[in-house]
Image (cartoon, helix red, strand yellow):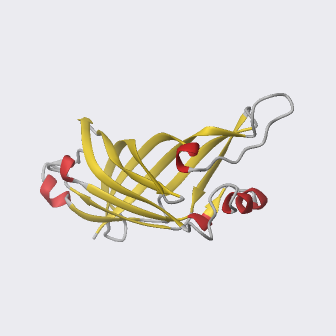
Amino acid sequence: MTAPTTDTAALSGTYTLDPTHTRLGFVARHAMVTKVRGSFGEFEATADLDFTNPENSTAHVVIQVASIDTGQAQRDEHLRTNDFFDVPSFPTWTFASTRVETKGGDDFVLHGDLTIKDVTKPVAIDFEHTGTATDAFGNFRAGFEGRTTISRKDFGVTWNAPLEAGGVMVGDKIVLELDVSAIKA
């Protein structure tokens, strides 16, 4: 995490994710031939960012699973059922960072524990710090782009349907895509 100023201590502090300028998304293989993209519209997230010593940074995210949106209402309703995420029993997903690994320049890996359907697994998310700026309203913002791949089966999301020509309806590998705009408190 580098910043356009040499005063990295001034950039450090507590940040909250701006839900109107942040996308917590995913990509899943459908019917073995195409990808379905979606995102979550409701979440709360904070990060304590240390631009001087990035390995001291932390993040915590809570996602409201009912806010899932793939652009197709019938599919979204199916994803909310017990076949997939069982939203009545497991209304939230959480991520809590455990450490930051710097990679050089603006690249780092955020390690943490992801909980989906009461199953917690460690994940490593590759991130790039995309910049900092003061917006038109005087808010200081930091931007990040992140990506990782998880196995949905590792989290107990196992529903599938066989295809007549072979293969299955839903791929196991899910790519998580994170486009983050965080505002300093």
| Quarter of the figure with residue 39 | bottom right
- Residue shown at 70% from the left, 48% from the top: 159
Q: Residue furthest right?
A: 164
What is the x, y in percent for residue 146? 42, 44
Whether residue 45 is situated above or below residue 3 in the rendered picture: below
What is the x, y in percent for residue 31? 76, 37
Q: Quadrant of the N terminus?
A: top left
Q: In this view of the protein, which residue sits in the foreground, 75 or 105?
A: 75
Q: Is residue 5 left or right of residue 34?
A: left
Whether residue 115 is situated above or below residue 150 in the rendered picture: below
Whether residue 134 is situated above or below residue 110 in the rendered picture: below
Q: Is residue 25 left or right of residue 75?
A: left
What is the x, y in percent for residue 163? 82, 35
- Residue shown at 23% from the left, 44% from the top: 2
Q: In this view of the protein, which residue sits in the foreground, 184 or 26?
A: 26
Q: In this view of the protein, which residue sits in the foreground, 22 or 80?
A: 80
Q: Is residue 40 left or right of residue 181?
A: right
* Number of numbered discs visible in the structure rendering: 0
Q: Is residue 81 left or right of residue 108?
A: right
| Quarter of the figure with residue 147 | top left
| Quarter of the figure with residue 44 | bottom left
Q: Quadrant of the C terminus?
A: bottom left
What is the x, y in percent for residue 124? 38, 42
